Image (tube, grey):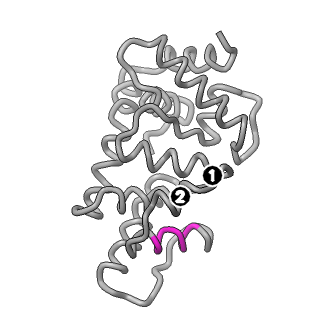
Amino acid sequence: MHRFTKNILDCYSASTCVELEAGREWYDRAELWARTICPLDVNRGAGVIAALSPRQTWSNNKIAAAKIVKAVDNFSNIVPTVTGTYQNVDKALRIARGEDPVKILGGSKRNFKVFRFFQNITGNNRVVTVDTWAARVAFPDCYTPYIRGRLYLELESCYQEAARWVDKISPRDLQAVCWIHIRGSFE
C-alpha cells in the first residue's frame, strides 16, 4: 500500500460521524447549488462554480457563481464584482453565456483540479478533486498551493485506492470526508 493511501485511510478513520455524513453529502449539496443557480442546466451551474473555485472559500464561490449567472441571465453587460482572478471570472462568464464547460475547463493538464471539481459536482464519483487540503491529507509535507501533473494523478490514484479499502464509499466522497476533517470545516 502506498504511504499516501495509508495517510488517507488514517484521516478517514479519524473522522467523526458528523464529518463522515457531511463528506458523503458534500458533492450532492454542491450539485443542488448548481441546479439552484441554473435550474435548466446543471452543467452550466457546475461549470461556473468550478471556474471560480481556485483559491476561494466555498461560501464566496457560491455567492460569486450566483452573481455571474444572474448577471448573464439578466443580459447585463456589467461584470459583477466577485472574488477570483480575471482569467477565472472570464471562464465563468463564458460558461454562463453558454460555452461548453468541458471545453473551457477540461483542456489543460495544468488544471486537473478545476475540471475534476466540475466532474464531481455533476455526479462523477470516480475522479477526485485534489486541492491543497486533499493533498496535505495524503502527503503532509506538501505545501505547494497548486497540485499538477504527475503528483496530481498520483494523489488521485491513492484516493481511488483508499476508497477500495473502505466499504461503500466513492473516491469523490472519501476526498470530501478527508477535506472536511483536515480543515475542521464544512465550508
Q: Is residue 172 found inside the magenta-colored segment of the image?
A: no
The amino acid at mark 1 is Asn
Residue 113 versus residue 134 in the image, above or below: below
In this view, 8 is above or below 90: above
SS class of the residue under badge 1?
helix
Q: Magenta span covers which residues?
A: 88-94
Above or below residue 94? Residue 136 is above
Seen at 59% across and 34% down, the residue is: 134
**Does the residue at mark 2 contact the one at mark 1 (Cβ under 8 Å)?**
yes
Give the quarter of the figure containing the N terminus: top right
Q: Nearer the viewer, residue 67 or 92?
A: 92
Residue indicated by mark 1: 111
Instruction: Determine which of the numbered discs, if any, sits on residue 86 in the image.
Output: none
Please report whichever mark, 2 or 1, sits nearer to the chain's N-terminal start.
Answer: 2
| Magenta-colored stretch includes residue 90 | yes
Quadrant of res 124: top left
Residue 26 % position (x, y): 37, 39
Q: Which residue lies under the disc numbered 2? A: 105
Q: Residue at x 47, y 83 (%)?
A: 79
Instruction: Name the spot of residue 49 as percent of width and height, x first.
Output: 44, 59
